Amino acid sequence: THRWPLVVGLGVFLVFHDLLSEPAVLLVFAAVLGSALPRVSFSDPGVDGFVRRAVAALACGWFLAWTVGQPALVRARWFTAPNDARTVVRITRAEPWMLEHLEFRLDFLLAQADPWTWDTAAEALALSDRGVVVAPGRARAWSLRAGAAVRTSQDLGLLPDLNDRIRTSFRRTVDLEPFLPWDRLAWAVHERSLGNRSRARELVDEALAAEPNLVSGWALRAQLALDEGDAVAARRAAQKVQPILDAHRWELLRPYERKLLEQSAAARVAVDEALQR
């Protein structure tokens, strides 16, 4: 009966492993392994006692090497290898459940200023698919999947089924992180690019409801109003921007707060245009 609490704990960790850090998971695995091993008395005399101790030591050593040593070696290899598709393939083969190299590579591809080629798009889409397989409960994995699909549609055109992929990925991201505005805003930008202004407006309103200090959200709200020829609504949305900037001008901001105040050049142009109406 002493093993049942640990077994139940392992079950809970397995259900929620996407939301937990690796050390916590390893602690539970180590505890369960310790409870599963036969109780060995280190004072047992003779060959039988030595064999039992040796088997227990080898089992524990293998477990630690598999759970700690092998991922550490893979990460060391990743840190020193070139940032290219071949490295990602090798790391994935060695550690199929590792996410850091996938997300780093996707961030690198999404940050490229040059238009994507078909090879780049294929790599990004495949990596993002792998990410949601490894961690289906991780919002960032779904966000990167949506970002890869959006970038593909921007640079290479809206391919068949690509729009479904974008919407499904954004929906899953929003479901997993309902209080963060960024993905709703990116989703709204995509819908606006397709001419779905009413849906874009709904998404912007949801983002602003989650975070009223989202400067880029008010700028996009002004852009949507200008698209519809509503100068009054555009001016009303644009007038929200400067008070938010002024309120945070002299504060020591955290990264989250700095991100709220970011504006693209197009957003600043839209705000200025709305204020002049």
Image: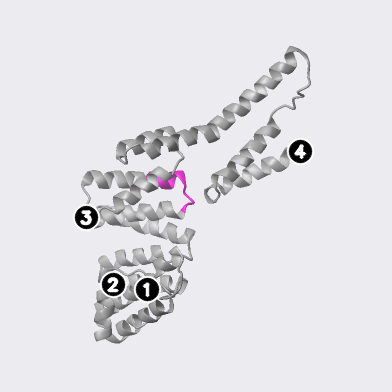
Give, as a three-letter code, the residue at label 1.
Val
How has the structure been colored for display? one colour
SS for callout 3: helix
Check the image and report above or below for 185 versus 236.
Answer: above
Q: CA distance from mark 1 to mark 3?
A: 27 Å
Residue 66 pos. (x, y %): 53, 31
Who comes first in sequence, dot 2 or dot 4? 4
Query: Quick one: label 1, few (<14), some, or many (20+) residues within 10 Å?
Result: many
Residue 157 appears in the rendering: no
Who comes first in sequence, dot 2 or dot 3? 3
Q: Is residue 57 left or right of residue 231?
A: right
Query: Quick one: label 3, few (<14), some, or many (20+) residues within 10 Å?
Result: some
Region in magenta: 128-138
SS for callout 2: helix
Who comes first in sequence, dot 1 or dot 2? 1
Give the residue number, with chain letter if any, for mark 1. Answer: 215
SS for callout 1: helix
Query: Quick one: label 2, few (<14), some, or many (20+) residues within 10 Å?
Result: many
Circles 1, 2 touching at the beta carbon (< 8 Å): yes
Could you say which quadrant of the image residue 56 lies in?
A: top right
Residue 38 pos. (x, y %): 72, 26
Give the residue number, with chain letter if any, for mark 2. Answer: 267
Q: Nearer the viewer, residue 89 or 224?
A: 89
Given the current orientation, which residue lies at the most extreme top position? Answer: 47
Give the residue number, with chain letter if any, for mark 4. Answer: 2
Residue 272 pos. (x, y %): 26, 80
Quadrant, the N terminus: top right
Query: Quick one: label 4, few (<14), some, or many (20+) residues within 10 Å?
Result: few
Q: Nearer the viewer, mark 2 or mark 3?
A: 2
Check the image and report above or below for 215 versus 109.
Answer: below
Q: CA distance from mark 3 to mark 4?
A: 59 Å
